[in-house]
């Protein structure tokens, strides 16, 4: 059964939080999931949608270390929903927790994105 605990574990295995810089210099944060298998990521997408999130989903061509492959990706881009994800679902990984804290406090380490 898909629940917050399942999504947290799936995020820790297949997700990340990252920021991009907008033209004016402000940061835009995103929660992203990426998987080469479609079944689990579809379940996570459906769960998030049912919980009131607005995840974007798409296929992405990934030219990685082991060659070209297609991966499934979903992102949460609305800043209020990024915050909600952090507060309600979270992560067990210390690196993700550090990034969550950067989002919540509005600070970012040099070189991080």
Image (tube, helix red, strand yellow):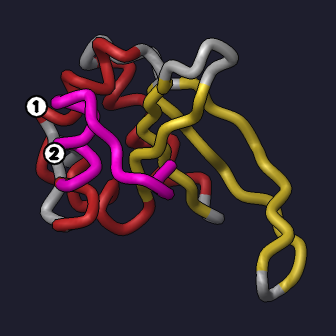
Residue 87's disc number: 1
Left or right: 38 as drawn, with respect to 26? right
Q: Residues within 10 Å of mark 1 (few under 14, many from 20)?
A: few
41, 74: nearer the viewer: 74
Task: Tell me: residue 82, above or below residue 65.
Answer: above
The quadrant holding residue 96 is bottom left
Q: Find residue 3 and report its horizontal and vertical position in percent.
A: 16, 41
What span is colored magenta in the figure? 98-113
What residue appears at the point 52 percent right and 34 percent down from the top-left corner?
75
What residue appears at the point 32 percent right and 26 percent down from the top-left corner?
82
Count of numbered labels shown in the rendering: 2
What residue appears at the point 80 percent right and 63 percent down from the top-left corner?
62
Q: Find residue 55 and report its horizontal and vertical position in percent.
A: 48, 24
Find out whether the residues at labels 2 and 1 contact each other: C-beta distance under 8 Å: yes
Residue 10's disc number: none
Q: Regarding mark 1 in the picture, which secondary structure is present there? A: helix
Residue 90's disc number: 2
Residue located farthest toward the bottom when viewing the structure as drawn: 66
The quadrant holding residue 97 is bottom left
Q: Regarding mark 2 in the picture, which secondary structure is present there? A: loop
| Disc 2 from disc 1: Cα separation | 6 Å
Task: Tell me: residue 7, above or below residue 47.
Answer: below
Left or right: 33 as drawn, with respect to 82? right
108, 45: nearer the viewer: 108
94, 48: nearer the viewer: 94
């Amino acid at each position: 059964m898909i629940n917050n605990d399942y999504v947290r574990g799936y995020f820790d295995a297949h997700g990340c939080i990252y920021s991009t810089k907008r033209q004016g210099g402000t940061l835009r944060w995103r929660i992203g999931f990426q998987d080469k298998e479609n079944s689990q990521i579809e379940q996570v997408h459906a769960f998030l949608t049912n919980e009131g999130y607005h995840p974007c989903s798409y296929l992405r061509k990934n030219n990685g270390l082991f060659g070209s492959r297609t991966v499934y990706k979903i992102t949460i881009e609305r800043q209020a929903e990024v915050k909600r994800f952090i507060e309600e679902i979270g992560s067990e990984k210390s690196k993700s927790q550090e990034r969550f804290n950067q989002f919540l406090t509005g600070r970012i380490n040099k070189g991080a994105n």
